[in-house]
Image (cartoon, grey):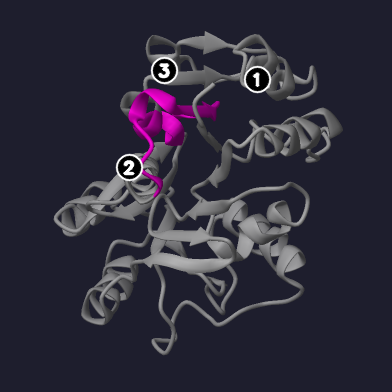
Amino acid sequence: MSRKALFFDIDGTLLGEFDGRIPESAKEALKEARRQGHLVFINSGRGYILVKPVLEQVETDGALCGCGTCIMIDGKAAYSYHVPYETGIKLRQAIKDYKVEAVFEGVEGCYFNQEPYRIPEMEELRDSVNRQMGGASLPLEETSYEFDKFCISADHMSDTKGFFQSIETDFTIIDRDGFYECVPKGHSKATAIQWVLDYYQIPLKDAYVFGDSMNDLPMFEFAENTVLMGKHDKGLEPYATFVTKTVEEDGIAWAMKELGII
């Protein structure tokens, strides 16, 4: 069998919905795939700082982070893109003007408001990320750090349409049920896959992607072999070439065996 390149989303694909753990069957399947000479990559919207805990649990050849803004190969940054400094300054002002609430994401950290968020979900997100990172990182208002993408939440006080119009030249906006990922134009989970395929000289027909939610849409539109988890967003169904079981039902391992990868 020719060498395959396998790309895995994290939440809802490798990680279970209920316990937030990676099943042992999935860990063993990824390990076996590498033993057979295939390449294994995480492909996530998370920044590298939040992907690292996953990389400590599974054997991989690298990680595609921040919707393609950072590509790590064997623990080293092979590609990295940061939002230009002046764009970041304008963005901070737009966040205030249009009354949206944001978190900036980078390789080294996630950056939140110093003051409490108006929207409870953002407070919960900050608490969750700070627990994972072992404490708070730099505040969003600082300008001394680099970041790669950002997310926003909005409520009745927000001018969401006005905000999106102010950033549409520079960012692609992904709607995740009212929580929006904003990714620099020219970057996505699909562009990251293409970069890896070019780097290793692997044809697209030998790439397999595994996902469950709408931020996986770019890689499902791009790839020829698309594995959809048993629990998933319906919008991905037209692009799926194989539907597997849920995370908790050992869907990763089952799909890789059924497809003859391991």
- Res 235 label: 3
Where is residue 24 drawn, in percent x and y?
85, 34
Q: Amino acid at mark 1?
A: Met
Rendering coords of residue 251 (x, y %): 71, 19
Q: Earlier in the sequence, mark 1 or mark 2?
A: 2
Quarter of the image that includes the C terminus = top right
Packing grade of label 2 (10 A; few <14, some 14-19, many >=20) is some
Give the residues drawn in magenta, as a range: 200-219
Where 46 falls versus 110 (above or below)? Answer: above
Which part of the image, by quadrant, shows the N terminus?
A: top right
Res 229 quadrant in image: top right
Q: Is residue 156 visible?
A: no
Relative to residue 80, is residue 6 drawn left or right? Answer: right
Which residue is denoted by mark 2 in the rendering? 194
Of label 1 and label 3, which has the lower sequence position? 3
Report crowding for label 1: few under 14, some 14 to 19, many 20 or more residues within 10 A (C-alpha): some
Which one is closest to the eye, mark 2 or mark 3? Answer: 2
Q: Nearer the viewer, residue 232 or 255?
A: 255
Name which quarter of the figure residue 84 lies in.
bottom left
Tell me how far mark 1 sits from mark 3, CA to CA: 23 Å
* Element type at mark 1: helix
Residue extending farthest bottom: 144
Residue at 14% from the left image edge and 55% from the top image edge: 169
Give the CA distance from mark 2 to mark 3. 23 Å
In the foreground, 186 or 1 = 1
Residue depth check, mark 1 versus mark 3: number of the one nearer the observer: 1
Amino acid residing under circle 2: Gln
Q: Amino acid at mark 3?
A: Gly
Q: Which residue is mark 1?
A: 256
